[in-house]
Image: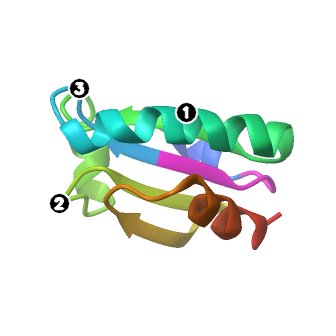
Amino acid sequence: MNNFETLISGNKPVLVDFYADWCRPCQMMAPILEDVKSQIGDQATIIKINVDENQALAAQYGIQSIPSLLIFKQGQMVWREVGVHRAAEIMAALQKFL
């Protein structure tokens, strides 16, 4: 998935949500991430990666529980959390890397 490597290599922070459609906590994260996106605008990128469809990528980043939220900046993982988090927590984490 070369596209992924290119996406996370920029100067803008990228929040990656590793999820699955069948995962109830992942479904709970969707509106929270939409809230974060509306607050952060173009200052950061938010992408969702389905672990069932991207097993190699999930394995590459050691995803064992979902939802897993990772923030990348300039190709480096700078933050990682597992589980459902409030929008304020995610915003605080993103703002550290703007």
Question: Would you say residue 38 is visible in this rendering?
Answer: yes
Mark 1 residue type: Asn
Q: Earlier in the sequence, mark 1 or mark 3?
A: 1
Q: Which residue is disc 1 drawn over?
A: 3
SS label for mark 3: loop
Mark 3 residue type: Asp
Residue sitting at 48 percent across and 59 percent down? 70
Q: Position of residue 21 (x, y in %)?
A: 23, 26
SS label for mark 2: loop
Q: Which residues are magenta?
A: 10-16
Q: Which residue is disc 3 drawn over?
A: 21
Residue 69 belongs to magenta span? no
Label 3 close to label 2 by CB (< 8 Å): no
Q: Which residue is disc 2 drawn over?
A: 64
Q: Position of residue 93 (x, y in %)?
A: 64, 69
Give neighbour class at mark 2: few <14, some 14-19, many 20+ (Cα, 10 Å). Answer: few
Distance (Cα) linking label 1 and label 3:
22 Å
SS label for mark 1: helix
Q: Earlier in the sequence, mark 3 or mark 2?
A: 3
- Mark 3 or mark 2, whichever is nearer to me: 3
Does residue 98 appear left or right of residue 64 in this picture?
right
Give neighbour class at mark 3: few <14, some 14-19, many 20+ (Cα, 10 Å). Answer: few
Q: Earlier in the sequence, mark 1 or mark 2?
A: 1
Q: Is residue 41 above or below residue 58?
A: above
Q: Position of residue 12 (x, y in %)?
A: 79, 52
Q: Is residue 53 above or below residue 93?
A: above
Residue sitting at 35 percent across and 45 percent down? 18
Q: Nearer the viewer, residue 49 or 37?
A: 37
Q: Which quadrant would the N terminus be assigned to in this image?
A: top left
- Mark 1 or mark 2, whichever is nearer to me: 2
Distance (Cα) linking label 1 and label 2:
22 Å
Q: Nearer the viewer, residue 72 or 23?
A: 23
